[in-house]
Structure formats: C-alpha cells, structure tokens
Image (tube, rainbow, N blue to C red):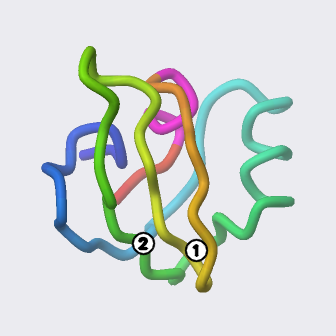
Amino acid sequence: MTLADLPNESRGQIKDLAGDPTLVARLRELGFIRGEEVRIAGRAPFGEPILIEIRGSTVALRTREAQCVQM
C-alpha cells in the first residue's frame, strides 16, 4: 500500500520510500522518513494534489510522488 492509496482523513506510518531516486531524495528532505506518522488532510476535486500533514506541516504531493511512500 502506498500513501496515494490511503483514504481522506486517515493516518498511517511510513514503512519505506521507493521509486525515482530524485523524488525519494526530495521526499526525505520534506521529512518523509521511515517511522514518521502522516495524515491525509484532503484531496483536490480531481484527486490531486493530495494534502498530507507530516511533522506539524501540510505538504501537497502529486499522486506520482505519493506512490513513492510505502505504508
């Protein structure tokens, strides 16, 4: 399961990051690291971007980026 698969208002814990090394590096810089808890705060009307709360901040990710985060 990936971050993109979680429904709105749900929480999860990051298990791993996988995919394009450039995207993975960017996600790590934003605080997406193993063990961190995230919450899906919402989605735009057509499904993207996805609003994610992590470490007290809200981050907007494209579906392609959210699919790199394994839950």
Q: Is residue 9 above or below residue 13?
A: above
Q: Residue at x 45, y 68 (%)?
A: 14
Which residue is the extreme one toward the front?
45
SS for dot 1: loop
CA–CA distance between discs 1 and 2? 11 Å
For the C terminus, give its image quadrant. Answer: bottom left
Q: Check whether the beta carbons of the residues at disc 1 and disc 2 lie within 8 A of each other.
A: no
Q: Percent x, y for residue 44?
A: 33, 29
Magenta span includes 9: no
Position of 70 compared to 23: left or right? left
Q: Percent x, y for residue 12?
A: 29, 72
Sort mark 2 into few (<14), some (14-19) or many (20+) by Cα contacts within 10 Å.
many
The quarter of the displayed image where residue 37 is located: bottom left
The quarter of the displayed image where residue 20 is located: top right
Q: Residue at x 61, y 83 (%)?
A: 55
Q: Disc 2 marks which residue?
A: 38
SS for dot 2: strand
Q: Which residues are magenta?
A: 64-68
Position of 15 compared to 40: left or right? right
Q: Amino acid at mark 2?
A: Val
| Nearer to me, 63 or 21 | 63
Position of 15 compared to 12: left or right? right
Q: Percent x, y for residue 56?
A: 59, 84
Q: Amino acid at mark 1?
A: Arg
Q: Disc 1 marks which residue?
A: 34
- The secondary structure making up most of the magenta span is helix
